[in-house]
Image (cartoon, grey):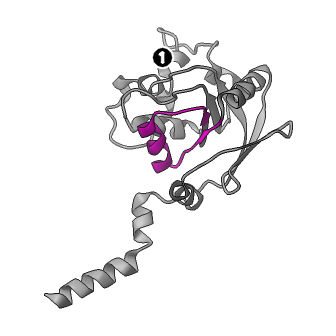
Amino acid sequence: MKAINEISSVLTPLDRKNVDTDQIISKEFLKRIERTGFGKYLFYHWRFNADGTPNKDFVLNDPRFQDSEILVAQENFGCGSSREHAPWAILDYGFRVVIAPSYADIFYNNCVKNGILPIRLQEAEVTALLEKGKQAPYRLDVDLKQQTVTAEDGTSYSFDIDPYWKEMLLNGWDEIALTIQYDAYIQAYEEKMRQAQ
């Protein structure tokens, strides 16, 4: 995974509540076995019309947000089924940070395990960011080490994150990489068990 420390980007305002994982990545695109290539299907049925043409009214088709790395949405983001393809699609599209008032627990954990920083802010704070982001491109600076989100007008918000998840994201570790940090202890234990036999 790619380490996250500071991310500076215009936010993409997805002003919707209860966005479920089937809306994030629809079931017909789950046939792939690799983790890459899902970004083109992110929010597919919102991004494209029935004839396959881009829906000009959907925020991801707005050129102002083309290179955005920060997605901001309303409460209960990532609800529904626990498909891991949802964070794969978000990350593959280019988002490294998601900000919302609340998340489905499994989705939140899947984000962290796949290198996405999910940030919880107060509903009023998220609403303020969405409103500013919809009016004009609005830049945020996310600092994981300091656990802050700073808006371009100087407003700063703090967020909480479990120290375990924070260490994983700062170092770009998945759970396998974290286990490997204890390789010397594991080998010493295995050797001790061999000698005891």
- Between 95 and 54, the residue placed more toward the observer is 95
137 or 108: nearer the viewer: 108
Q: Could one spot residue 119 in this view of the protein?
A: yes
Instruction: List the residue tagged with mark 1.
Output: 45
Q: Quadrant of the C terminus?
A: bottom left
Q: Secondary structure at mark 1?
A: helix
Magenta part of the protein: which range?
99-121
Q: Label 1 sits on what residue type?
A: His
The part of the image, by quadrant, that contains residue 81 is: top left
Q: Is residue 111 magenta?
A: yes
What residue do we see at 70% from left, 27% from top?
Answer: 124
At label 1, counting other C-alpha atoms closer than 10 Å, the crowd grade (few under 14, some 14-19, many 20 or more) is: some
Residue 37 in view, yes or no: no
Hey, which quadrant is residue 31 in on the image? top left
Q: Relative to residue 142, is residue 47 drawn left or right?
A: left
Residue 106 picture location, percent across and down: 41, 39
x then y, percent, for residue 95:
59, 38
Tell me what residue is drawn at x 46 percent, y 33 percent. Answer: 104
Vertical placement of residue 38 versus 178, above or below: above
The correct choice, above or below, for 178 with respect to 9 in the image is below
x, y (%) of residue 131? 75, 22
